Amino acid sequence: MSIIGYARVSTTDQNLDGQLAALKAAGAAMIFREKISGVRADRPQLKKMVSALRRGDLVIVTRLDRLGRSVRELLNLLAEFDKLGVGFRSLGDPWCDTTTAHGRLMLTVLGGLAEFERELIRQRTGEGRARALAAGVRFGRKPKLSDFQRKEAVGRRGNGETLAQIARSYAVSVSMISRL
């Protein structure tokens, strides 16, 4: 079993020293570090760390917000750790320790709340969409050609004009005219 640390600061002006010292004091044999915003999904060192994890390893961070910015992101990462057979501990948040029954319980409760919140959002979005449709709102992009232009283009094609000529006259792609 290896203890693996992950340290992150949001900007290049910030310093990793405090996190590194705390992770080393907690026994981290290897520490992945990056200076990148937590909002960004493409965090190369985090990906590198996850790919280096082995069953029985323990990932530690100084605070939960160092690992992810949203509950959903955190829960997804913790689910991935669980699938890999890897434990997780936040030094600054003692309740968040997947190696204990209490920590797993707290994360399960958080997961349930996040799932509930996502379902409420989905429900509200669906209701809003239904109200908009009932009010006559059209979704999607506006059509590039009006109904009259569509009929006219089909007629021109029937009269022998090429797809390219018709498309050029309406400033649309040839494939759009061919679909008509």
Image (cartoon, rainbow, N blue to C red):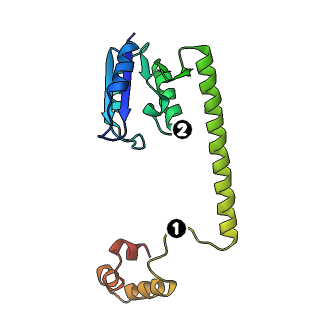
Q: Nearer the viewer, residue 3 or 151?
A: 3
- Front position among marks 2 and 1: 2
Q: Position of residue 28 (x, y in %)?
A: 36, 15
Residue 164 left/right relative to 127: left
User: Splitting the image into 4 quarters, where does residue 18 fall?
Assistant: top left
- Looking at the rendered image, the quarter that the N terminus falls into is top left
Say what amino acid the circle numbered 2 marks.
Arg
Q: Residue at x 39, y 19 (%)?
A: 22
In the rendering, which numbered label is found on residue 140?
Answer: 1
Q: Pointer 2: residues within 10 angstroms few (<14), some, or many (20+)?
A: some
Q: How far from the left and from the top, in percent, is residue 129?
A: 64, 62
Q: Amino acid at mark 1?
A: Gly
Tell me if residue 107 comes above or below residue 149 in the rendering. Answer: above
Q: Secondary structure at mark 2?
A: helix
**Residue drawn 64% across and 49% down?**
121
Question: Circles 2 and 1: CB distance less than 8 Å?
Answer: no
- The quadrant of the image that shows the C terminus is bottom left
Rounded to the nearest angstrom, the CA distance separating label 2 from label 1 is 28 Å
Secondary structure beneath label 1: loop
Closer-to-camera residue (20/129):
20
Residue 164 location (% of width, % of height): 29, 79
Residue 59 on image: x %, y %: 42, 20
Q: Earlier in the sequence, mark 2 or mark 1?
A: 2
Left or right of 79, for residue 50: left
Identified at 41% across, 40% down, the residue is 38
**Of 8 and 173, the residue lying toward us:** 8
Residue 30 falls in image quadrant: top left
Name of the residue lying farthest toward the top: 1
Q: Is residue 108 above or below residue 114?
A: above
Q: Which residue is mark 2?
A: 72
